Amino acid sequence: MNSVSPSAVQYIVGGGAHEDKPSAQSRCHNGHGSVPDGLREGSGEPDEVDRLKAKFMSAWNNVKYDEVDGFRQAFVSCVWLTYRREFPQLEGSSLTTDCGWGCMLRSGQMLLAQGLLQHLMPPDWRWAECHPLTDVDFEVLKPRSPSRPAGMSLPSFSSSWTSPISQRDPSSGSSEGHRRTPGGCPAASNEPQVEALHRKVVSWFGDHPSAPFGVHQLVELGKESGKRAGDWYGPSVVAHMLRKAVARSAEFHNLAVYVAQDCTVYKGDIMRLCELSESAGTGWKSVIILVPVRLGGESLNPSYIECVKNILKLKCCIGIIGGKPKHSLFFIGFQDEQLLYLDPHYCQPVVDVTQGNFSLESFHCNSPRKMSFSRMDPSCTIGFYAQTKKDFECLCSAVSEALSSSKEKYPIFTFVEGRGQNYGLEGQSGGSMDGPANIFSCNRLSRNSKRGSTDEFVLL
């Protein structure tokens, strides 16, 4: 999200009714009424001014509506994961639905899915069958004036994916135009092959026991943290569950997930994690970085809002899992003082993703939603993605700069050199994956809070 962002692009978007009255738009955008007829007749200069105004407004409206369409394609191409019903019974329970308790699991799935799309798909990929937006208040997309547009910030899935933090020499063999498949090969530019990969990514989140990132697998991993099917999950616990799920998946030998400790990202731990594959001759391992944080006490500290916006503008950011109290959401961007999100609270029938041509329609949303920053619960997990070592170095610099915008004495989180004493590299060096997740509280951010843990995020 640099111009827009979790990887982002700046969308200057407009919408609402398509107005065909240049004079009305001129009055609205330029603060002038129509030029009196007498002036038009008495001099050629005002006519020229009017013509220039008309050309300007025509070009401006074309940009606005083009960007709305760009936003539509980017939004609808995101993988949307919601409550499901009538799926195979969860082991150790009688539950065949996650409705009413699994919204944070679904938000975590969407965050991971966004990271996988960024990891595997071509940077300009859009779902070919994306539908028009429906049930949209286009005021959220409307700029206030040509000279002061309201920027739409979206994560890395946005239309102009090329990012200053991920520029590479085309001769280096790792081009920006090709993502690597799980086997390490570039994603084909051939559309049928790319769409087959899109379908495969969605299938990994299917609601059956064999799906590597499905609810069944996540619930099993949650047992290691004392959670059971039907329990509520916090954003920090889910971050560790996603880490273990990726480490256990046979599909990914070139991707790791790192979870920050106590609001601190240890660069040494990430370097070691990603260089393990490099020493085996398979190159640097791409990484998804998850940072559980608390942005205040009982409610969001307003001083952190600008910092969150700057993070969402970064192209390396893949989203935020959090929500509002008792209601988990996946935040993908913002516009002015409104967060944009995908909502998992919609119970749909299960889809059998083991069938070769299963329907994708229920895995993509065409109804954007918005929420005031002031309603955001302070407990959340922020996600980032770096494909190469250079990307990681640029990520550290870009995120540190975004964090410095906070007016608070303490930043939301920090990057430090060296390694954390408690960070395990399970699954990367032959260690056990069965130990409990390391979960910490950002005490310096919540010393006045009655809730000391980032996992006391109560969900319905």
Image: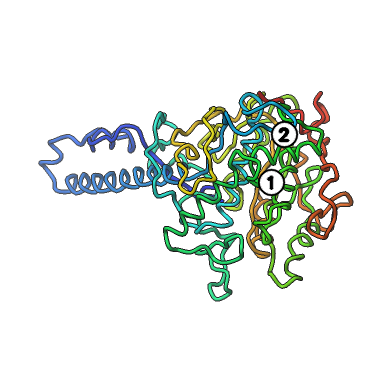
| Residue 288: mark | none
Can residue 313 be seen?
A: yes
Q: Residue furthest bottom?
A: 171
Residue at 81 percent of width and 26 percent of height: 448
Residue 46 percent coordinates (x, y): 19, 44
Q: Residue at x 61, y 53 (%)?
A: 316
Nearer-N-terminus badge (2/1): 2
Measuring from the top left, give residue 397's x and y in whole percent. Answer: 68, 57
x 14%, y 48%: residue: 44
Residue drawn where x is 36% and y is 43% of the image: 64
Which residue is identified by label 2?
91
Can residue 442 be seen?
no
Q: Which quadrant holds residue 104? A: top right
Amino acid type for the residue under numbered disc 1: Leu
**Circle 2 sits in a helix, a strand or a loop, which is it?**
loop
* Quarter of the C terminus within the rendering: top right
Residue furthest toward the left?
41
Residue tagged 1: 403
Nearest to the observer: residue 209 or residue 453: 209
Classify 51 as above or below 388: above
Amino acid found under the numbered disc labelled 2: Glu
Neighbor class of circle 2 (other Cα within 10 Å; few <14, some 14-19, many 20+) is some
Up-down: is 454 above or below 263? above
- Place of residue 309 in the rendered image (x, y in percent of width and height, measured from the top left): 59, 41
Residue 32: which quarter of the image? top left
Q: Is residue 34 left or right of residue 417?
A: left
